[in-house]
Image (cartoon, helix red, strand yellow):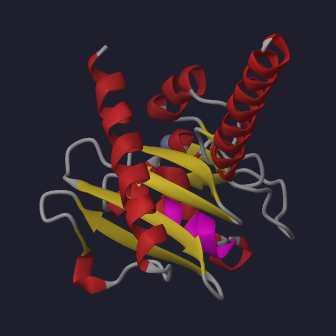
Amino acid sequence: MNILTDNITLLKNKMVRISLNVKEQKREKIEIVSDSYQIPFLEGLTKKTIIAGRNRVNLYYLNCSCKIYRLNVKKYPRRDLRRICNHLYTKLFSEAENNLDELSKLMLHNQFWFSQTDVRRIKFYKDILYTGFHKDHNIISLFRDQDGWEKFVFEITNNNWRNGLSPLYKENKLNELEKLIAELNNDFLQSLKS
Ligand SMILES: [Zn+2]
């Protein structure tokens, strides 16, 4: 009798352990890898400083002498997308567009033209994706490499992908992704209030 109850307890413990393992594995499949986007060093650029109106801009080090840039330096790490001011943005595209990688271009445009304010890098099963948050708009951006980086826009109010263009996933995975980015976006909006 005792042996039997002991065995049942053992078995139950084992089952608990197995179910924990399954949860842990699932957790590893989806993970926030980073809460920022860093612009990689631009290959083939000289280190010289150029003049942009009243400011001095350096595209190699990605810095500018303007007030906004200097304020951003205190808030964000080196090469962080959020450090980039208007002068850097303009000069990057007029002087060094060919040195920029595709993802950085999409990210820069999204920040300057579509008010993206924050980025998360996420591991979603075997993929590395980026989500962009827009604090004043009911949209979430999603960047995925599908034979080259592409941007997708999820419209929160309609619960739909803009123009019906979604990342190429099967329905279950796409639903999971939509839930995930909505949750992350909510967390982001909450963090602005606190
Ligand atoms: Zn500037």
Q: Residue at point 52% right, 67% down?
A: 143
Hey, which residue is sitting farthest front in the picture? 1
How many badges with numbers are in the image?
Answer: 0
Q: Is 185 in front, or is 51?
A: 185
Residue 133 belongs to the span the image colors magenta: no
Q: Quadrant of the C terminus?
A: top left
Q: Is residue 70 visible?
A: yes
Q: Is 16 in front, or is 91?
A: 16
Horizontal and vertical percent position of residue 172 = 44, 71
Could you tell me what secondary structure mostly forms the magenta stretch?
helix
Residue 105 belongs to the span the image colors magenta: yes
Q: Residue at point 67% right, 31% down?
A: 77
| The image quarter in which residue 178 lies | bottom left
Decide if residue 65 is on the left or right side of residue 162: right
Q: Residue at point 27% right, 41% down?
A: 135
Q: Quadrant of the N terminus?
A: top right
Horizontal and vertical percent position of residue 103 = 61, 69
Q: Is residue 54 visible?
A: no
Which segment is the magenta one? 101-107
Horizontal and vertical percent position of residue 125 = 66, 61
| The image quarter in which residue 161 lies | bottom left
Q: Is residue 58 above or below residue 89?
A: above
Decide if residue 6 is on the left or right side of residue 152: right
Hey, which residue is sitting farthest left in the picture? 157
Q: Is residue 107 above or below residue 185?
A: below
Decide if residue 162 is on the left or right side of residue 151: left
Q: Is 85 in front, or is 16?
A: 16
Q: Is residue 176 above or below residue 165?
A: above
Q: Residue at point 30% right, 26% down?
A: 190
Horizontal and vertical percent position of residue 21 = 74, 38
